[in-house]
Image (tube, rainbow, N blue to C red):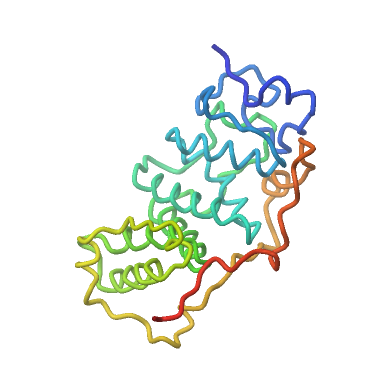
């Protein structure tokens, strides 16, 4: 059965084909990354693109989700989940590396401007490093899942002492994270904690402890520019609150 990216009731609204012409937008081709249960539900073009990218990433197509997730993470504060998901996808794609990443049929329309002509798509090591870079940015901004992911990735058995030292730093940030404490979650087990227990931490006045919000990049490629522009497709869609209206995501007080 052929599947469309958007329900029929949404198609008359145009959506400018998401502005980026994601797969199945105005096409009769079956999208290999979506099912009837995980179709985007609406919002701004950027929100729809994020829902699409999350859906295909969940279904094992992180390589195709990466251009969307990386672009949205570049929009700065408010897009921490996209940045985190991009980091995780980059690590996952690096672990199953079979060659340079490229656009595959069925995910983007032929007229899309999506490009894999970026250095981090070319080699396994550069893709992994891109994933770590993305996670470091959201971890530094107080995103607890990114802090935990870095602690696990860098604190794995067999890694270097320097990696373990950074892993313990992120584990400590995770343990002190006020957002994590609200939900009472703890996904870091005793094995990694025991392994990292003796690694030194930066001094309390080190700049590494400073909370750093995501910052919007001034320049984005044509695909990314096309992805984020456009108006909401539903009356109830609201603009995101200004950064000054958002609560601080984390408190790191060293105690």
Q: In the drawing, does residue 135 fall left or right of residue 26?
A: left
Say which quadrant the N terminus sits in.
top right
Q: Residue at x 24, y 70 (%)?
A: 196
- The location of residue 89, given as percent across then percent down, is 45, 47
Percent position of residue 254, x then y: 41, 81
The total of numbered circles placed on residues is 0
Q: Is residue 125 above or below residue 231?
A: below
Left or right of residue 137, residue 160 in this image: left
Horizontal and vertical percent position of residue 229: 76, 46
The residue nearer to you, when weighing 160 against 53, is 53
Q: Quadrant of residue 173?
A: bottom left
Q: Nearer the viewer, residue 225 or 169?
A: 169
- Relative vertical location of residue 125 with respect to residue 233 in this rendering, above or below: below
Q: Is residue 21 above or below residue 116?
A: above
Q: Residue at x 34, y 63 (%)?
A: 151
In which quadrant will I find the C terminus?
Answer: bottom left
Residue 191 position by quadrant: bottom left
Q: Position of residue 46 (x, y in %)?
A: 68, 44
Is 8 left or right of 174, judged from the image as shown? right
Residue drawn at the location 24% of the way across and 66% of the way down: 193
């Amino acid at each position: 059965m052929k599947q469309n990216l958007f329900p029929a009731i949404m198609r008359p609204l145009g959506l400018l084909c998401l502005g980026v012409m994601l797969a199945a937008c105005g096409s009769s081709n079956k999208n290999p990354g979506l099912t009837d249960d995980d179709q985007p539900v609406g919002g701004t073009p950027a929100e729809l693109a994020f829902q699409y990218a999350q859906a295909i990433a969940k279904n094992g197509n992180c390589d195709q989700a990466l251009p969307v997730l990386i672009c949205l993470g570049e929009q700065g504060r408010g897009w921490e989940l996209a940045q985190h998901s991009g980091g995780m996808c980059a690590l996952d794609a690096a672990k199953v590396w079979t060659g340079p990443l490229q656009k595959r049929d069925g995910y983007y329309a032929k007229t899309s401007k999506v490009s894999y002509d970026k250095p981090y798509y070319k080699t396994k090591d550069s893709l992994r490093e891109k994933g770590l870079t993305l996670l470091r940015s959201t971890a530094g901004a107080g995103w607890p899942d990114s802090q935990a992911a870095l602690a696990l990735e860098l604190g794995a058995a067999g890694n270097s002492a320097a990696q373990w030292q950074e892993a313990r730093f992120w584990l400590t940030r995770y343990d002190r994270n006020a957002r994590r404490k609200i939900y009472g979650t703890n996904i870091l087990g005793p094995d990694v904690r025991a392994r990292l227990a003796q690694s030194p931490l930066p001094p309390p006045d080190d700049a590494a402890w400073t909370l750093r919000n995501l910052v919007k990049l001034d320049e984005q490629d044509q695909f990314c520019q096309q992805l984020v522009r456009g108006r909401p497709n539903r009356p109830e869609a609201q603009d995101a609150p200004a950064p000054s209206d958002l609560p601080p995501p984390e408190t790191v007080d060293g105690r």
